[in-house]
Amino acid sequence: MTDLADRYGTRTSPRWLWWVVAGAGIGVGIAWAAWIALQPRPVSTEVYSFVAVSDTQIDVELEVIRPEPTRISCSVYAQALDHSIVGEKTVEIPPSDREIVRHELSLTTTARAVTAVVRSCEVTD
């Protein structure tokens, strides 16, 4: 008969080490999740509706969700059927006490627009 330690080898690291590593990993994960949860919520904006009024105008309604009554600046553009940008506008949306607001705007276009897209929105002071 052969000795099992000779055949399979012996454990080189203590068994408790893996429990410490796993506990530290779980602790870091919980701390990261708490840090993310406590961050301020960002401003969210999307096109709520749009109507192509004519070949040179599109009316857009934006839905803005913001946790604090801050002023934001949004860049919106209109696209033609071939995906070319036919109009663009940057609008200032004033502060509001309501978390969700809708803002209407009109874009002048160089050709008939088939959609409107929010390029970016950022908080301005």
Image (tube, rainbow, N blue to C red):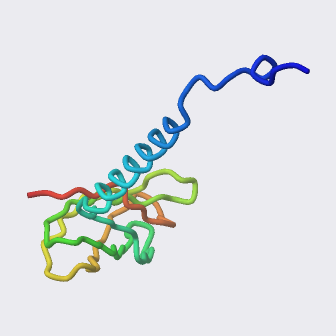
The part of the image, by quadrant, that contains residue 99 is: bottom left
Identify which residue is drawn at 27% across, 80% down. Answer: 100
Q: In the displayed structure, would residue 18 be above or below residue 99?
A: above
Of residues 89 and 109, the one drawn nearer to the viewer in this rendering: 89
Residue at the bottom extreme of this rendering: 98
Q: Position of residue 85 (x, y in %)?
A: 44, 52
Question: Left or right: where does residue 78 sit relative to residue 62?
Answer: right
Q: Position of residue 35 (x, y in %)?
A: 28, 55
Of residues 116 and 52, the one drawn nearer to the viewer in this rendering: 116
Instruction: Give the position of the N terminus as an image quadrant.
Output: top right
Identify which residue is drawn at 55% across, 26% down. Answer: 13
Q: Position of residue 107 (x, y in %)?
A: 32, 66
Of residues 43 and 114, the one drawn nearer to the viewer in this rendering: 43
Instruction: Please count the marks in the image.
Output: 0
The part of the image, by quadrant, that contains residue 51 is: bottom left
Q: In the displayed structure, would residue 122 be above or below residue 56?
A: above
Q: In the displayed structure, would residue 4 be above or below residue 58?
A: above
The part of the image, by quadrant, that contains residue 58 is: bottom left
Residue at the right extreme of this rendering: 1
